[in-house]
Amino acid sequence: MKFDVKKETERVIEFIRNYYKENNLGGVILGISGGKDSGVVAALFVEALGKENVIGVTLPCHSKDEDSLDARLVSDYYGFHLINFDITNTFDVFKNELRNLGDFSDEALKSSDINLKPRLRMSTLYYLAALYSYIHGKTYLVAGTSNKCELYVGYFTKGGDSVHDISPIADYTVDEVIEIGRYLKVPDKVLFKTPNDGLSNMTDEDKLGVKYSLVASYMEDKTSVDEDTRKRIEKLHKANLHKFNIPTYRRSE
């Protein structure tokens, strides 16, 4: 079935408006990475709530300057307020404290370091959401920016970018997010930027070992991809299912 970008975009905007109205909410805080997902989410919220109710945040942490510049492209185009909150020193203090526990190799710390950054970023976003809720006298939510392909293969950090209050693009594949972005006129430099986490100096697809387009094809029809690709996607999906549920013991009667 052909993707009706106009209809889907309008539905998401209406979803946001209705949720805010029903729950007497005021604004949104979201991290702006300089990539397509955060760019599209920002555009959707500007359309739904007005630019005056959207606050974007860049959260550099040993990051490339290009990412902040691309984030500025988005905020300048849509006219919402953009804050730069550098967490590099916070990250470094954490790493310095870690030395008290022992002398660990870079390889041993690699995964922990990569996942610490989104956790610090999400803590910062929630702090700012509470701060601006108080200052402006209305409730700000923290928006999630994960797409359907990322979620299916578990490409997100538990306790990091998995934490948010509202998720507008979680049911759209990468290609569909790009279509929505084109419809909302997200700057091409951002919309067609090679996706990467800004943390590991690797592209998303390099880290995953599979292209997002193949993940989307698999979700639509498992037989549409070759066996090696299918096994890779299924392995990623199963290995990350724990990220979606917290096992909780319930007393029996």
Image (cartoon, grey):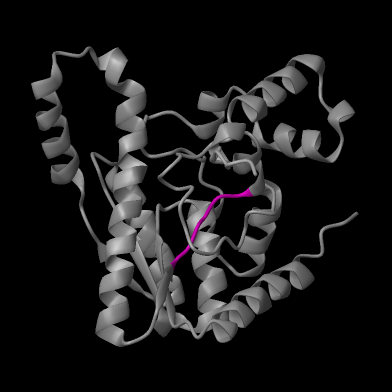
Q: Quadrant of the C terminus?
A: top right
Q: Is residue 109 left or right of residue 16?
A: left
Q: Residue drawn at (28%, 67%), measured in percent from left and top?
A: 128
Q: Quadrant of residue 176?
A: bottom right
- The front one of 106 and 243 is 243
**x, y (%) of residue 231?**
73, 18
Height in image: 244 above or below 235? below
Height in image: 143 above or below 33? below
The residue lying furthest to the front in this view is: 253
**x, y (%) of residue 6?**
75, 71
Please give the range of residues in magenta: 142-147
Q: Main secondary structure of the magenta part?
A: loop
Residue 137 lies within the magenta run: no
Q: Is residue 229 left or right of residue 147?
A: right
**x, y (%) of residue 125?**
33, 60
**x, y (%) of residue 13?**
64, 75
Q: Is residue 52 left or right of residue 124?
A: right
